[in-house]
Image: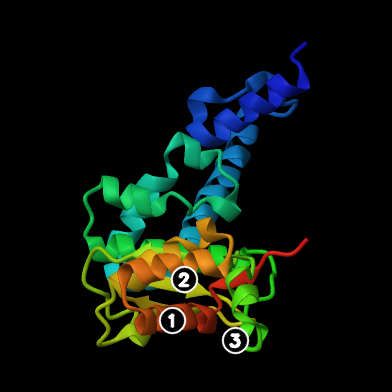
Amino acid sequence: MSSLADGQSRFVACLQKGPAHFPADLFSQNAERALLGLKAHANNISHARLVALEDSFPRLHAHMGHEIFHAISRDYVEQDHIMACDINHIAADFSTFLADRANSGTEIDIARIEWAWIESYRSVEAPPVVLTDIATLAEDKLLAFPIAAHPAMHLIAITGPLSPELGELANAEPHALMIARPQAQILFHPLTAVEHAIAEKIADSMTMGNLLQYALELSDEATAMQHIIKLIQTGALTQITG
């Protein structure tokens, strides 16, 4: 007698790979009726995967057009590792798939931005550092103030022209984009190359003094402080506690 695990494995293989993997010995009813039911179930799962991609990338869908987006989405979801993926994370590798298919930088950027938006939305809660947290600190306390990157903050290097679907960034020509969620709303923040470089160092800095020192290596004192203040105002930092 087949084990439960073996039966489940063959059942899933049939759903993923089609009738050639039909486990006829698992069903008490007529094999043709069982196979018909499995086909309907597999079609529902396939449709759900495609809908999940559309829901994850509405701007990319609009930018590419339905037919092109649907065609590349179907190729994507038919990969073995995507078939086995949890539907909540099915879109995680889509930007890499687009890059492998030699899509434009604009399309790849949109995919990365929209997936980063989802990750920001799902990230754990953490209070952002605000200017009032540090405004009255003495210099030594300010430099020693412990910081980390806010868990909802994500950075995306821009590799192509911005799509019109990113209307809130019209007329911007950023080197990179920061996605942050300091409170309930997720916001996009265009970054220069220097701002991007400083933001990338937040996770390694551990203290405000270390982050400021890195900013000073890239700009003068006044400009360095402006960059730090911008990062604070966008909600990019959280305080390390405990």
Residue that label 2 marks: 212
Residue found at x 50% / y 61%: 51
Q: Nearer the viewer, residue 218 or 127?
A: 218
Residue that label 3 marks: 131
Check the image and report above or below for 2 versus 123. Answer: above
Q: Amino acid at mark 1?
A: Met
Residue found at x 58% / y 71%: 143
- Category of crowding for the residue at label 2, using alpha-carbon neighbours closer than 10 angstroms: few (below 14), some (14–19), many (at least 20): some
From the viewer's perspective, is the residue at label 3 or at label 1 nearer? 1
| Residue 225: assigned label | 1
> Do tag 1 and tag 2 residues touch (Cβ < 8 Å)?
yes
In the rendering, at what x and y percent does residue 98 appear? Answer: 31, 52
Q: For residue 128, which quarter of the picture?
A: bottom right
Measure the C-alpha gap from mark 3 to mark 1: 12 Å
Left or right of residue 213, residue 43 in this image:
right
Measure the C-alpha gap from mark 1 to mark 2: 7 Å
Q: Earlier in the sequence, mark 3 or mark 1?
A: 3
Q: Report helix, strand or loop for mark 1.
A: helix
Residue 78 visible from this viewpoint: yes
